[in-house]
Amino acid sequence: MKSFFKYLLATVIGMLLVCLIMFFVFLGSLGAMLSSDTEVVVKDNSVLELCIDKTISDRSYSESTGVAMFSMPGLSKTAGLNQMLKAIEQAKEDNRIKGIYIKYDGGSVNWAIATELREALLDFKESGKFIYAYSDNYSQSGYYLASVADSVFVQPQGSVIWQGMGVQIMFFADFFKKAGIEMQIVRHGQFKSAVEPYFRNDMSEANRLQYSVLFNSMWKKAVADVASSRKLSPGRLNEIADSLCGFTATGAFKAGLVDALVSGSTVEDNLLSVRSGLADSVRVSRVAWADYAKTVKPANKSKNKIAVIYAEGEIVGGSGSAGEIGTELAADIEKAVKDKNVKAIVLRVNSPGGSVLTSDIIYQELIKAKEKMPVVASYGNYAASGGYYISCMAHRIFAQPTTLTGSIGVFGVVPNVKGLTDKIGIHIDEVGTNKHSTALNGVYRPMNSFEEAVMQQSIEEVYAGFIGKVAQGRGMTPAQVDSIGQGRVWSGANAIEIGLVDELGGLKQAIACAAEMANLEAYSIAEYPKEKSLSEQIFELLGDVEARSAKAYINKLFGKAGMDAYAYLSQIMDMQEPQVLARMPEILTVE
């Protein structure tokens, strides 16, 4: 009888899940039908509105799938750089568009993407059309982007963050000691700082050096660009940063960071209309960039294609899921190569690295692709460690000056919780058929010297293979790569000087380079990975909603400190067995 009720309950739960999924599919289909019938109308004397209220990622996905309709706790919203760039480029030549209105509304804009958007907006200004920018409160990267505008406005009680670049890193050595947890670290590279928080209470001198060089390089670029746009000297901008005068709107105005203190409604109801040549009483028509992007027509319909393959997120074992890079990316590369119309590949990388095994699978697939067609790499915010590994073989590599790249190094971490289990009265015993039957496959005892030597040998072999691949791809010797490797992170500007990157530029420049290498005058763009079906996306969302919800609530309760701790500790929870990883530090949020 107990079995009967158990199976009955399982059946009922299964039926409820199926019904829930079908309900979502119905909503998605309905949303797709409704959205497909909506025609975007762009009126004369319109202003293109770039509302920065989401995280900007490299790529947009169509909302026609209906997934955008779902409102689940913790699901992040993103906007795609690729569609934003297309909208700006078309608006430059569209006589209906009189200007661009940047409305910064708290979205997350990393420095490399802000740089790429800024370049597109500078190109737009060559048309003679205006750009206005407004925010209640500007983040530092948000202001960097907005500073390209002809006029920059802020709310009278708002602020402009302009303080310089830095990072705060959380260290856990004393915490682990008190908890009875030993993080057994094996690494190659004095700069491989991803593991320092597990066994130190402060930054090593090598780590402090690399960050100092990195941030100074990035800050120099940011200051130079803002100085050019705002007609302020680099020295004056550094004085403003040191004084923190932008933390008040009046201070920002007096310092010359903004042009006026006004409300958003004043900008939208009056200033945009006047700047567009309309009477005060006539409100300008604003068109959202996401809607306008739907009107963008392909430059041509050539059968020749350039495949733009997006490698965005952490590199993980297995096929990967939303926001991750898995072995499915290798399959996408293979599909692109098999398409007889694809004449070149641009690999767009935005990844801090991760699994060495998955990185090598993707690398090997790109090596095969390189034998048949040009392969060009374009780096976004990160192309570090595993992100650099998968792309170091490209014919040409493009990066922004503010891209974080390099971090050529590997490490392994094996947690040992014996001290914790002893403290709470849990005891572990073991039995096996051979000397090392339980070696490196558990967290309940420390590694012995033999096991540690085996782990170190594995690390050394992976590192030797890594620098060998970089040496072959970049035309260097392994010794030369080792001298700039050791896990050190470089800015894109510095990476040019040491030979890790070929040119400074964004995705547009990388595509143009690929077309030139393939001798293509006309071509269309094919983006990979292809969009997943609605049901596949729903299953991914349902499968990941628990973790996303946890992150959302931690962020709500504890803010940045909670999210930093969550990132490190969740990585530890994933290390239930030894892993060899090629990734940059988990926490590197450049303010």
Image (spheres, helix red, strand yellow):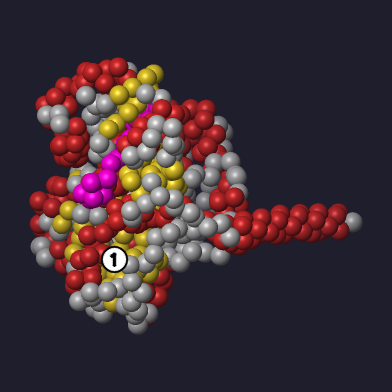
Three-letter code for the amino acid on which mark 1 is drawn: Val
Expressed as whole percent of the image width and height from the top left, the position of residue 234 reads 12, 30
Q: Would residue 253 appear left or right of 8 to someone viewing this image?
A: left
Determine the residue located farthest toward the right in the rendered image. 1
Q: Residue at x 14, y 47 (%)?
A: 494
Secondary structure of the residue carrying tag 1 is: strand
In the rendered view of the protein, which quadrant contains the C terminus?
A: top left
Query: Can you tell which quarter of the image residue 390 is in?
Result: bottom left
Residue 147, given in percent of the width and then of the height, sits at 26, 35
- Quarter of the image for residue 168 reads top left
Q: Residue furthest bottom?
A: 340
The quarter of the picture where residue 525 lies is bottom left
Q: In the picture provided, is 38 more to the left or to the right than 233?
A: right
**Which of these two is toward me, 482 or 17?**
17
Residue 425 within the segment the image draws in magenta: no
Q: Nearer the viewer, residue 566 or 265?
A: 265
Task: Work out whether 158 lies above or below 109.
Answer: above
Is residue 188 among what the camera can see? no
Asked whether residue 138 is drawn in magenta, I would say yes
Q: Count numbered badges in the picture.
A: 1
Residue 53 percent coordinates (x, y):
44, 39
**Picture coordinates of residue 9 (x, y %)?**
81, 54
Disc 1: CA contacts within 10 A as few (<14), some (14-19) or many (>=20): many
In this picture, residue 475 sits left or right of residue 150 = left
* In this view, 263 is above or below 182: above
Q: Residue at x 36, y 59 (%)?
A: 311
Quadrant position of the N terminus in the picture: bottom right
Q: Is residue 292 visible?
A: yes
Give, as a single range, the part of the protein colored magenta: 123-142
- Residue lying at 30% horizontally and 73% vertically, measured from the top left: 523
Circle 1 sits on which residue? 346
